[in-house]
Amino acid sequence: MTRRIAHSAHHRGQLTVMLRMLGREIYSTYGPSADTGGLMINNAPTIYPYPGIEALIDGESRGGAKASLPGPGDKPCTERPDPV
């Protein structure tokens, strides 16, 4: 079970990096992302592209009508300390 969780997290990280290199916005998967306001500890929201299956099908059939994202906000979007 631990290997399965670690393996899935590894591939999620890979896909996130690839999407960022392509200039895509990253919506929430299991919680906030840098594009949805940063860290959960800073009360960043969880934002999904569509509220449900029907909205996804309707929005994508019209060329994409995803929810807008607020961006990282004014606080750091990482728990890493600032470089010295």
Image: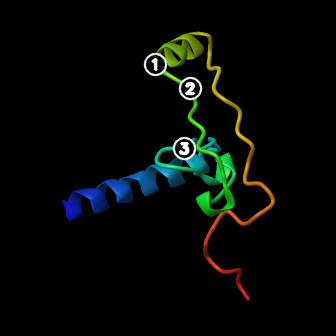
Instruction: Tell me the quarter of the picture where residue 13 sits.
Output: bottom left
The image position of residue 11, as x and y in percent, is 37, 53
Q: Which mark is residue 50?
A: 2
Dot 1: element: helix
**Which quarter of the image is occupied by the C terminus?**
bottom right
Dot 3: element: loop
The image position of residue 51, as x and y in percent, is 55, 25
Q: Are marks 3 and 2 in contact (CB under 8 Å)?
A: no
Residue labelled with disc 1: 53
Q: Are marks 3 and 1 in contact (CB under 8 Å)?
A: no
Q: Which mark is residue 7?
A: none
Number of marks present in the image shown: 3
The 10 Å Cα crowd at callout 2, few under 14, some 14 to 19, many 20 or more, is: some
Q: Does 63 sit above or below residue 22? A: above
Residue placed furthest toward the bottom: 84
Residue placed furthest toward the left: 1
Residue at 55 percent of width and 10 percent of height: 58
Residue 23 appears left or right of 13:
right
How many angstroms separate mark 3 from mark 1 (CA)? 16 Å
Instruction: Tell me the quarter of the picture where residue 24 sits.
Output: top right
Residue at 59 percent of width and 50 percent of height: 20
Q: Does 55 sit above or below residue 76? A: above
How many angstroms separate mark 3 from mark 2 (CA)? 11 Å
Dot 2: element: loop
Name which residue type carries label 1. Ile
Name which residue type carries label 2. Tyr
Name which residue type carries label 3. Ser
Residue labelled with disc 3: 28
Q: Are marks 2 and 1 in contact (CB under 8 Å)?
A: yes
The image position of residue 69, as x and y in percent, is 70, 39
